[in-house]
Amino acid sequence: MSRPSIAAERTEQIMGATRACLLQYGLAGTTLERVALESGLSRSHVRYFVGNREDLLRLFADWLFVGFESGMDDLMSATEPPQRLSAVIDYLFGTGFLPISDDDAAVRELITAGLNDEKLRDMLQSRYNQALGLIAGAVRDSIPGVTAKQARTLAYGIWSLALGNSTLAEIGLPEASGPTPRWAVEALVAAMTPRA
């Protein structure tokens, strides 16, 4: 069995350090110097493996979303088509987004960075569009007769509720961790489901 490349190991090390810095220092305080210190590497090594600060943030965002997409892909593969929407809702309003993790705070920092970094914003939009596509696919698999536009609209509503609920859970709103978000998404699904 071959050993992972040094570049892959170092990149993983730098991504973990970037997460720690975003959580401890916020976006403004996440510098190459701090990431280097946190990772135990020199600044020149960090720069060699990931580039400048903007490159680092883009790579980190991509790294974070790969984990989410992998979880969603595994979920879809393990679930029969008629049950996929229910499984996605369970994931988005349960183990996938709750309880709040360090990744949630890191994603919010990246969204803030994306306001001023067009390349990061484009990458975030692309990743969110991929998530919408996965959810829309689950809608089409689970609801007979739904059009592509209806599936995309419903996926947008589900995704928006999941992201908003995650933010509200982070600030401690009691309803965010109870049954209310699930009821809201079920009402949305019922309202958008074509009548036979």
Image: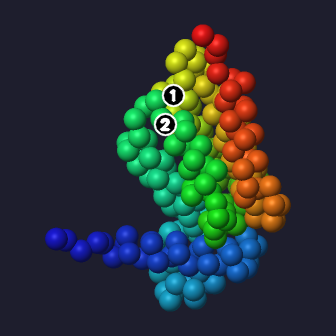
Residue at the spot 63% in from the left edge and 68% down from the top edge: 101
Across and down, in percent, residue 153 comes to 68, 27
Across and down, in percent, residue 137 comes to 51, 31
Residue for badge 2? 84
Q: Secondary structure at mark 1?
A: helix
- Residue type beneath disc 1: Ser
Q: Is 55 placed above or below 10 here?
A: above
Residue reaching furthest top? 196
Q: Are marks 2 and 1 in contact (CB under 8 Å)?
A: yes
Residue 109's tag is none
Across and down, in percent, residue 188 comes to 72, 31
Q: Secondary structure at mark 2?
A: helix
Q: Is 130 placed above or below 114 here?
A: above
- Say which label, 2 or 1, has the lower sequence index: 2
Residue at the spot 72% in from the left edge and 41% down from the top edge: 183
Residue reaching furthest left? 1
Residue at the spot 55% in from the left edge and 14% down from the top edge: 145
Residue for badge 1? 142
Residue at the spot 54% in from the left edge and 60% down from the top edge: 64
The quarter holding residue 57 reads bottom right
Figure coloring: rainbow
Across and down, in percent, residue 52 comes to 59, 69
Q: How many numbered discs?
A: 2
Residue 119 showing in the rendered view: no
